[in-house]
Structures are given as structure tokens and as C-alpha cells.
Image (cartoon, rainbow, N blue to C red):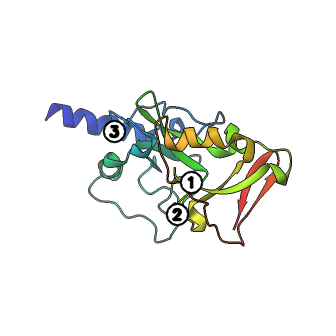
Amino acid sequence: MTRLLLLGIGALALVGCSDSHGAGGDGGGEDAGGTSGLDLCETPDDCVVVPASCCGTCGEPTRDDAVALNRASASTYRDMACGDDFACPACAGMPDPTLLATCEANRCVVVDLQAHVSTECGSDADCRVRTADCCECGGATDPASMVAIAIDDAAAFEALVCGGDFGCPECAPAYPASYSAVCEAGRCRFVP
């Protein structure tokens, strides 16, 4: 019982200091406030990005309000962040596919693709469209699941979302013809 009480108090303190949860400018970083073990992981697929605050922005995390947690602990974290009596604004937000969660040193961390090496570019020709899922073959292709990465740094992106030991089916990914990738301000950006 004492452990649960301390866990709840720690999570509420964490939510109260939302500035410690940002994705940072270095392409990723551990949550400075700690998440009381809710961020433990073994592979990138164990992790998910959620709002650090109760409601986020229309239910979605933003660069200033994001934390990476173990996928199985996300609802526990939300319950601790929101308490029993909460009402979020009636709006619908779109997830930001450039905010990803990965597993580093057995901790889930937020990675901002807009600051990650896998999106650095010099021209549009350096960029390509890709699903944010580990495997392109069979990965989600809706606009909210797509990112743009640098062709030459595809391995850096795969290491980020797949981890070290992965095997994907061999096939050519099929993305809608309207999707494209452009280089803006030195970063690849997805255009639906």
C-alpha cells in the first residue's frame, strides 16, 4: 500500500513539472522527472509517447508535453495524472508521428525526429517517405503514421524504431502516390 501511495505521489509530482518531460533538442532524452518504473522496456515496441499532463493538447502529446512510457503502463500513468475526477476538452487531436518513443538502456525515451540524425537533409532528393512502424511491409500508411527520413540515414531510423534484433518481411512498401517528402530547413518533412 505504501509503495502504491509513493508511486502515485511521484507521478503527480511528475505531472506538475511538465517542463521536465519535453522531447528536448537533442533528438531524445530521458524524462528528467522519472516515471516510477512505468518507463521500463526491452525493445522500442514496448514504448509509447503519451501526454505528460492529464489531457495533453486535445488528447495528444506535444513537444512541450510528452513522456515515453511502457505501452502496458500508459493507462496507469493516465489514471495517476488525471485522478478520479477529470474532464478533458472536447476536441480531437492528431498524433504527431515525428514524436516517437524508443527504448534506450531499458528505459522508454521520447525522440523528436525533427532533431534526429535520420531526418537530416540538404535537398528534397535526400528524403523519402516511410511508415513510422518498424517494418515497412505491412506497416500503417495513414497520414498520421507516416514520416520522412533521409535516404542515407535509414539505418539510424530503423535502429530507433526496431531496436537491434529485428526481422521484417521482404517486400516493397506500397505508399499512396500523393505522399511525398521534402527537405525544409535541413530536415526531411512528410507531405500528405
Looking at this view, is 167 or 90 the one in front?
Answer: 167
Asked if labels 2 and 3 touch by Cβ distance under 8 angstroms, the answer is no
Ranked by sequence position, the earlier of labels 1 and 3 is: 3
Residue at the spot of label 2: 140
Instruction: Provide residue 13's location: percent of width, then percent of height.
Output: 38, 36
Residue at the spot of label 3: 38
Using residue 69 as the reference point, say whether residue 23 is left or right of it: right
Ranked by sequence position, the earlier of labels 3 and 2 is: 3
Amino acid type of the residue tagged 2 in the rendering:
Ala
Instruction: Provide residue 22's location: percent of width, then percent of height.
Output: 56, 40
Q: Quadrant of the C terminus?
A: bottom right
Asked if labels 3 and 1 touch by Cβ distance under 8 angstroms, the answer is no
Local crowd at mark 3 within 10 Å, few (<14), some, or many (≥20)?
many
Using residue 27 as the reference point, say whether residue 15 is left or right of it: left
Query: Can residue 168 be seen from the camera position used here?
Result: yes
Residue placed farthest to the right in the image? 123
